[in-house]
Image: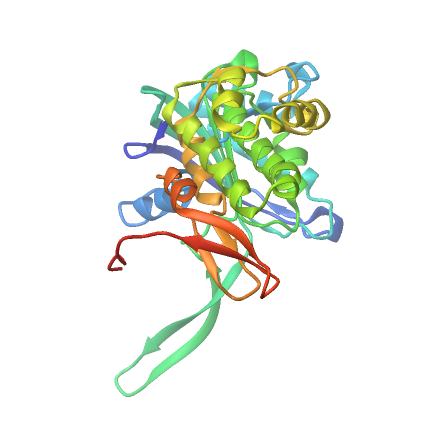
Amino acid sequence: MINLYNTHIASLSIHRVGNKSRNEGILLSASPYEMNDEITPLLKEFFLKPFRDKEENYFHFDTQTDLEFHELFNLVAAGFAVPDNMHDESKKIAKYLFDQSMHPHIKSGEVYVAYLENVLLDNEKVDAIGIFKSELKQDFLQFSEDEHQLDAQLQQGVNLNKLDKGALIFNVKKEEGYKILSVDSNRYDARYWLESFLGVEATADDNFYTKKYLKFCQDFAKDVVLPAEDKKEEVLFMNRAVNHFAKNDNFEESLFVNEVLDNPDLIPEFKHYKTEQAPKYNIEDITTFPIANTAVTAARKKIKNVIQLDTNIQIKMDFINPESAEKFVEKGWDEEKQMYYYLVYFNKEQKS
């Protein structure tokens, strides 16, 4: 869990990096940026807001090869070792990013390298290095006036409400490649930031396994439960799956299967599906793990709980009380109309 409320920007360096394949060049600032009371809170919000609003999916520098050969890891480690030299390291980081900016889709932009203090990570204060990039510019009007006239000039600038790319590298677990969060608002160059520049891989922690297992369940519901039964049962299966995760601190697969799969015939189908599909989700040998509540909450928001009918009618199921759908919604077939129907029982209509 991360808390950025009291985070302090101890130093900030700003450079400009172009697209190397288009010979756009690079501009490295000679000295750190001079912070002031007016712009510092705006920049802090610009840099950190995307990480407060984002699910905490952690990465670490790729350890498949020795970390001593990972260039960005070494630059970050040097910055943590001597924070007073952070500006020199920031120029090397900007040069390294420039060297990765070869694809024609990659846009030029400003690179901000910040040394951050008082970051609260898992209830401990740690330092962090933030690397951020702004790419997309927006038009705005700048006005000038004299005694008799108001004039408008069209200019371009960075929208402080949207950070294009960013990474927070926390000074913990150095031997494992540090603990890292990343955001990327632009999908036209998805591999450039995570793979080419940061060179990270997902950290297999409780959040990772919770997220992956729930995605596996969602695909099982779509690929197996829906064809075998119907849309109602697909939705109810995911209702039960999410609620099982929500009410337990630890996941135990055998308990999950017995509690969530109402139809015993689907149990062997579930085990077969996992054997076939597990590598896709990195859960091949995973049957127990601690459950991350933040991942469950995020998954609940993404899972559709609506039965969409071809008669332009929707039936919305309740994730909090799935037993209501099982008790008060019935599906049948009308011979006269040659159509399926849903029969819904209720005592009175609720006011919206």
Which residue is nearer to you in this view: 197 or 303? 303
Query: Where in the figure is residue 107, as x and y percent of width and height?
Result: 63, 52
Quarter occupied by the N terminus: top left
Query: Where in the figure is residue 155, as x and y percent of width and height?
Result: 47, 68
50, above or below 57, in the image: below
Q: Is residue 192 visible?
A: no
Residue found at x 68% / y 14%: 66
Which residue is nearer to you in this view: 284 or 115? 284
187 horizontally vs 318: left or right: right
Q: Is residue 319 visible?
A: yes
64, above or below 153, in the image: above
Which residue appears farthest toward the top when viewing the image?
A: 175
Q: Quadrant of residue 4?
A: top left
56, above or below 307, in the image: above
Quarter occupied by the C terminus: bottom left
Residue found at x 67% / y 40%: 191
Q: Count the marks: how many?
A: 0
Query: Where in the figure is residue 54, as x and y percent of width and height?
Result: 44, 39
Q: Quadrant of residue 91?
A: top right
Query: Where in the figure is residue 231, as x and y percent of width and height?
Result: 56, 47
